[in-house]
Structures are given as C-alpha cells and as structure tokens.
Amino acid sequence: MKVFLVIIFALLLFCPSANAVEFKIGGVYTAWAQSQQAFNFDKEAYAHYYVVQMLRFKFQGIANENLRFVTRLDIAQGWWGVDNVLKSKIRTDQAGGSALFDFKGTNFLIHIDQAYIDFKIPKTPFGFRVGRMWYGLGNKIMIDNNYDGIQMDIAGVIGEMLTFGWARVSEGVDGLSDDREVPPDQRGFTDGRDADLLSLDIYEKFGDLAVHAYGFYYTDRSIADSNAYIPDHLQYFKSRFSAQISNLYAFGLSGTWNIGALSLNAEFDYLIGEDKINNPKIGNKQLVDLNNGDLSGYNLYLKGNYAVSDKVAVGAVFGLGSGDDDVTSGKGNVNKLRTSGFFYITEIWEDSIMPDEEGITPQGLGAPNVRGYRELENTTILQVNTTLNLFPKFTTFLSYNYIAATNAIPAWSVSGDDTQVDYTKTATDLGQEIDFRFNYKLMDELALIFRGGYFMPGDAAGYLIRGNTDKSDAAWELKGIIAYKF
C-alpha cells in the first residue's frame, strides 16, 4: 500500500499537466460488528460473531467539464482477524474463512473496483465512458455489477438520456484464446470463447414521473466444455438449482413518482433465454437446475411511502419473482444475470453483499454459506413499515414482512455424488420477519447505526436451505455500524 500511495503522490506532484487538472477524493469508511444466529435454522450449530471494515476511495481527475477519469478502490477490506493476503487454503491446504472467496481480488489489501475515462464531445449530445465501471438497470434486481466495457450516452435525442452499453463479461480462459478447444488451465476450463453483454436504457421525465425503459442481451459462447460462466465461474455459490445461462434477453420498465407526501417506485422485468448445457445430474452441491433448455422469468416490485408528518412516515413493499415448478425437468427459471446484492427489502431473508467486487462478508440468508434466495427469485413478499424522526439526528425504521415462495419448494437430500429431489414433500411458506434500524448522526459525516432482524422460518425455508424441516429455530441478527463519509 505504501508503494501505491507514493505513486499517487508522485503523479500529483510531478505530472506536467497536474496544475491543469482538478483532483477530487471522496469515499467512505465503514466498520461493523455482527452477530448471526441460527442462519441454518439450528441454533446449536450456527452462532457467528465477527467484525468487518472497509475504506473506499473514489478518486477523480477533472480536466474540464467534458473530460475526467474516475477510479474507485478499496483498501484493507475484510474481516478482523482473517489474513486477506494469504488465504487459508494456500497456507494450510484446508478451507477456511478466506478460502470462501477463492480467486476474488478482495483477498488483497488494495482492490480496484472501477477505473474509467469519462468524456463528452463538445457541441454534440454524445458522451462516453471507457474502462471498468458499474453496469446496472432499474432497482438493481437483474444487473448490478462492475464490468469492463464502453457506455455511450446520447442526451435529448430519444428521451432525456439514452445509454447504450457493451461489456466484455469473460474473455474465456486466462490464455485469452478464442478457440473452442484449448488445453485446460489450473481450473479445468477448456472452451476459450467469450461472454458479452449489451444493454440499452432510455430515461424520460413526465412532470413528477421519472421512467426508465431498458433491456439487455447476454451471450456466453464458452459452453462446449459443459459449463457456463454463470454460475460455474463465479467462485461462489448461488442459490440452489440455478440454471446455466447461455443466452439471455431481458426487458424492463421502472419508474418513480413523487407527488406531495407520497412517493412511489415500481419495476417490472421479463426475461427469456436458453440453457444449452444438458446436465446429466444435479450434483451433490445442488449447483444446477435440470431443464429442457428454455429459460424464462419475471420480477414485479412496488414500493410506496407516505409522509404523515415531518416526523412520521408509513410505507409498504410488494415483491413478486417467478420460480421453478420443477428443478429436475421442464422449463428453467431465471430472474437476473448477475448482482452484487445491494437490492434491499429485509435484513435477513434476501439481504446479501456478495464476495465479489463490492464486499467479502456474508450477510443475510442469500450469502454463499447458506444459499437462500437473493433479490426476488421465487419470492412473494409483502412488507409494511414505518420511519420515525422523533428526535434531532435520530431516525428509526421498523418493518414486518410476510414471505412465501411463488412456486412450491421441494425437499431434497444428498445421495452419493448427486442430489435426490422429493416432490411428495413441498411447501410455499418461507416465513415471517421483523426488522429494525436505528440511525444516529453524531456529525454530518459520521453516523452510528444499530440494526437487526428476527426471521421465523416456514417449511419452505427449511426445504430451500437444508433440504428438510428437521430444524426450525428462528434466525436473528444484530449489527452495529460506524460509517464516515467524506
């Protein structure tokens, strides 16, 4: 890290054009202590306590109103007491906490999330971003990830803003070969062809209504070796019985409407695609869905908030995501391409910052060590909530959530090197959850936060996470956070 800081300082001090460039630095430091209990619904077998921190910088070099570069980096991100330089798998040949994250860059002291140039062509409606940057649509339900690529903005021609993006999601194997058959590397990949993402987002305002209409197309060509980039190459577990995505089309519409004391947010997405890999079995880790090659799915999200007064607001959230009615045959389900877990409804059920570019700590039941659903996959959820600002600088949020599976979830068990699914035992009652969040602004830039939740599992949650209902202890979590934004 010293070398990195010296390089930055030297560039600022000695670069000939430094006096013509305005440099801006912003970011956040966050540390949180966390207690997780019974996340596998067995209070005797799951009681975890840990502290995590992250220092994030956003660094910009602004030449003028039409040209800047942007980079975002995380320094010393990780668990207290976990060596993020040498993973336990390397040190001892035993899988430990840091080995959960495999090849992720967050195993190192400095991790670059984004690095791109942002420029506008003067006297034209065109702007471009080139490099590694964030790609996302709507409320981060379908896409929320950093990719390498190009984004082009066209202002005022179609809507207020039209944004077209291309991302190189995977360059195939490390040898950068585009051949269908190449010698396997240390991870066994043998198809060197690429995966790409094309996206289009049109933004328009109609008075108090702001609307995004968008779509994307994703293709993965590297499937001749019987594995797709998603989910096989992500280096973390997705939820069980996930389809392998070969091609995926998605279309969506989202909007926000603010009128007086009422604010509304809505989104609908429809996805259709292909899983061209004919998996012979599920496997003992429940990695893949067995299907006929056709994929489809949808998401519906509605959120409303009404300010009763300057101190009290009430709200509601409704979410509906498609599911798979048969994980051993028929059509497969798909609700998203890839997300980092920043879509939020609850503290425990679907909240999950994943071990990729954005963070390394397991959060809710969607984390890779538990493998519940994330976002709205096979989920029907209804939340009522209230926000209270009864004291200066102090905010309270409380919510109640009823959660069900859109399609029934079957029991399953591991048999040898495969998984047996039992459709004589199914359920849809995922559970109920009560959440709270207390936020106190010690200073304008410094906040102290205490938050948590209590999840009461139904039979469907047991089938999803354990394969059975032999344990049904309530899962709960407490988290204390200090956050400094600069």
Image: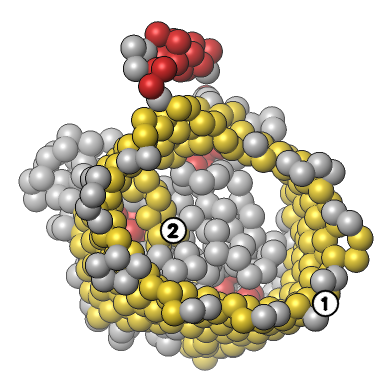
The residue lying furthest to the right in this view is 391
The residue at the point 47 percent across, 64 percent down is: 140
As drawn, is 299 to the left or to the right of 25? left
Q: Nearer the viewer, residue 309 or 30?
A: 309
Q: Which residue is mark 2?
A: 144
Can residue 433 be seen?
yes
Judging depth in this view, the residue of 282 and 254 nearest the camera is 254
Q: Position of residue 47 (x, y in %)?
A: 77, 53
Image spot of residue 43 (x, y percent): 79, 61
- Work out whether residue 93 can be spotted: no
C-alpha gap between disc 2 and disc 1: 34 Å
Above or below, 42 relative to 264:
above
Give the amino acid type for the residue marked by disc 2 in the picture. Asp
* Disc 2 residue crowd, few under 14, some 14–19, many 20+, Cα 10 Å: many
Residue pointed to by mark 1:
309
Residue pictured at 61% horizontal, 51% vertical: 362
Tell me the tag on residue 175.
none
Name the one closer to the observer, 367 or 311.
Answer: 311
Q: Which one is earlier in the sequence, the residue at label 2 or at label 1?
A: 2
Q: Amino acid at mark 1?
A: Ser
Quarter of the view holding residue 391:
bottom right
Is residue 371 positioned above or below 444 on the image? below
Question: Viewed as shown, does residue 239 lie left or right of 483?
Answer: left
Residue 240: x and y in percent read: 47, 68
